[in-house]
Amino acid sequence: MWGQPFPKVFEQRADLIAITRQFVSQLFGVPAVTGGKTFWVEKTPSNILSMDLLWELFPEATIVHIKRDPRGVLHSFMSQDWLPHDAANAAKCLEIIYLRWSLERARLNFTGRRYIELKLEDLAADTQTELTKFSQVSGVPVNRHIRQLDLAAVDRWKTEMTAEARQLCETRLGRYFELMGYEI
């Protein structure tokens, strides 16, 4: 029957959170511990839009938001098989994400939370300094042998993006540049 709502399985939200926490902990934590690791990382970009839920599940979690120049994001979007390849439609997709982030960012309470924003370009330019910032927030020691990111690859949009795509990005997404910490 299409008009019937799904039955209520959990009377209390706390019950749902507890079982979800247990499931995610087993899904990610057990393989991490088995592999000799002391923590695990989940890196789905859209998780940034679900930070309240993530902190409800794991209050001790550190959320790292690695930002990128919107032009670089648009350029990357257009090269993905699962996203539009043209700048106009890719910008529409990105605009929805930035709008949702702007609304989330405005309402989130970061007090007492472990949260850090890093720019991908800064991470590529000086990996150790940026990882030290991360370590200070998370308490996770920095691996000094981590591979340096390729800044040329991060900034590829500067040489590969067409002038038309760049202009479209700056016009369509211009209001979000400051939110992300960038200038047009």
Image (cartoon, helix red, strand yellow):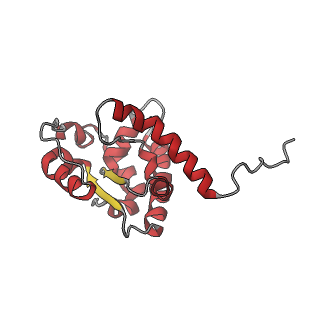
Height in image: 96 above or below 38?
below
> 12 left or right of 161?
right
Using the rendered view, name the quadrant where residue 98 is placed.
bottom left
At a point 34% along the width and 54% down the height, the residue shown is 62
Using the rendered view, name the quadrant where residue 154 is placed.
top left
Tally the marks.
0
Percent across and percent down for residue 94 are 45, 49
Percent across and percent down for residue 66 are 31, 50
Looking at the rendering, in which quadrant would you find the N terminus? Answer: top right
Percent across and percent down for residue 33 are 34, 35
At a point 32% along the width and 48% down the height, the residue shown is 71
> 182 left or right of 45?
left
Task: Name the foreground residue: 86 vs 25.
Answer: 25
Height in image: 67 above or below 104?
above
Looking at the rendering, in which quadrant would you find the C terminus? Answer: bottom left
Percent across and percent down for residue 2 are 84, 43
At a point 16% along the width and 35% down the height, the residue shown is 147
Using the rendered view, name the quadrant where residue 30 is placed.
top left
